[in-house]
Amino acid sequence: MQQPEKQNPVKKENKAVVSSDTRSATSAEAVADGSKAREAAALEVKNVDFARKLNSIVSAIFSRCGVPIADFTVSEPLSFFAKVNYNLTWNFKCRASDKPAGKISDETHVLSQSGLDEFTQKNSKELEKESDITKAYIKRLAEAKFSELTALAGQIMAFNRISAIGRARCKKCHGSKMAMCEVCSGKGVITCPSCQGLSDSCSMCNGTGFINCDTCDGTGKVVCRDCKGMGELVVEREIIYDSECSKDIEISLSVPGSDKTITSFSKEDEKIILEAANFDDQSLGSESSHGYKATFLGYAPCFAVRVNLKGETTPFDFILCGKSLKPICKPPLLDVVFKEESNILSSTLNIGSDDVDEKIVCVKALAGKAILAKTIRSIENYELDIIKKEAAKQGVTVESIIWENKNDLNSKARLIKSTVREQLIDNVSLELMTNAQGFISKEFSRYFAKNLIDFVPLLMMLNPNTQTVWTSVSLAVWLVNSLAVYFVPTIACIFLCIGLSIAVCAFTSITLTKNWTYYSAVSSLRIRHKMRKVPNLTSEAIHSVRLLFGTILINVVLFVLYNYRGW
């Protein structure tokens, strides 16, 4: 009768995970040149009317910037390729993992701690040696297609492993048999449950606020629950030889006629190029100690037009990629296009913030550019959203943040205002970059956003000296009216005085603030500030009504007094 075999404490499992159909190898020359990828990329756009598409795309961008068609010229399109080196690197390494062995039969030989450590050291070195399994794994990586290998990027794949059962030191107590008491966190004392540590005359803790922990008897240590005070566990240790795959992408392109090679791309541009690229399936593979690297060569079809802008000596290169002609490497075009508007805005803030004419010029300049008008309209919404979040976080009302006087701000209010402003600048800057479709530098957009935010509150002020001027005009008109009625107390004189008052009111309003022109200009922006429409003409209306009402009242009172008292 055949005796059953004893269970071996060492279990082997050798397995290659990656699979691929074997295909014929391409010559090294063809791989290095990437001719197949280049041909496939060129074939994709062979029948695309990219000249018309390029012109329409560029014209649409300039139209949104408010640049007249006569102010720019577009060259004939140039076609070229962006070269992509898609590198996949596998690093091979050994790692050991323990898991509780569970129920073990009597026939299983359990290794001691030293025996398990010796097993780990010996077999780790054995697995790291170049073996047939490692060679087979590398061969499959070398023969796999591009689509198969790119799916492995970022994954850890085990292709060789070995395991054994033995005793290992408990990881929780590190073999000391005692673990930290979780009730008192190893302190040996807990907060007094009677007075919660707040009474100086508590009889339970004698005013100390703490009592000894009953769970650990004040020692801070308890018997380790994992190993039950043995200091070691019976585990199944698995030594795994695995590979971790990482990717590295190198992209370069050079516009024909330019000596500059572009090698740095944004995440968005990189994504566009990779989607448009065609790759050779045969990789350039190279082995290293405990690793393997596969490089795939790809080409993405690109097109470029050179745009000359009126008044600028340096042309702009517009680069578009793929069959869908998506813009990449966008030039900071709006830094130049919006230079004049930026100077006007900066001048208004620094020099002419009280000058109505200056503000009107600035408003018209901003309203004439759709991108800027859209951005300035977003300020109020962003500010309110940020203020609501900060108010909820700090436990204050929204109104207290919006309307609190700048001179009365305490330290907390100043902190809130500063936080709101920084977040607002970030949001408006991002909004400007989004509206500009990326054709603007981050530095310029942030500078412009800051100035736009500072400019909006100025639109609430028709004239900073309005109150003083209206007071003086009203007193003068009332004095003249009083004297006129005193010397000529007739109905005709009263109506004449009222008519003159209306004329003075209209003349003062239009001359002082030019409010109708101002309102017409600002209303084109359709903006709000602090939940109010900009500009606010209520104050002007109040001044006018006060002057007219006071004039009528004075004239009527004087007429009655002069006629019925015999003066």
Image (cartoon, rainbow, N blue to C red):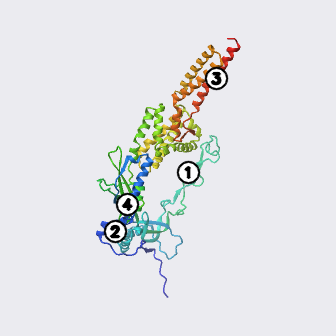
Q: Residue type at mark 1?
A: Gly
Residue 211 drawn above or below residue 23 = above
Q: Quadrant location of the C terminus?
A: top right
Residue extending furthest toward the right: 564
- Residue 361, horizontal then vertical, whole percent: 46, 36
Say the numbered circle drawn on residue 552.
3
Question: Which comes before the other along the chain, label 1 or label 3?
Answer: 1
Residue type highlighted by circle 3: Ile
| Residue receiving disc 4 | 248
The residues tagged by marks 2 and 4 sit, at their Cα atoms, a distance apart of: 22 Å
Name the residue: 56% across, 52% down. Answer: 184
**Mark 1: secondary structure:** loop
Binning the other alpha carbons within 10 Å of mark 3 as few (below 14), some (14 to 19) or many (20 upward) gives: some
Give me the C-alpha separation between circle 2 and circle 1: 73 Å
Asked whether the viewer can see residue 463, the reply is no
Question: Which residue is under mark 1?
Answer: 188
Mark 1 residue crowding within 10 angstroms, few (<14) / some (14–19) / many (20+): many
In the image as oriented, which residue stretches furthest toward the top? Answer: 567
Q: Nearer the viewer, mark 4 or mark 1?
A: 4
Amino acid found under the numbered disc labelled 4: Asp
Crowd band around label 4 with a 10 angstrom C-alpha radius: few (<14), some (14–19), many (20+): few
Q: Relative to 474, is 28 on the left or the right?
A: left
Q: Percent from the top left, x then y, of residue 546?
A: 61, 26
Front-lying residue, 567 or 183? 567
First in residue order: circle 4 vs circle 1: 1
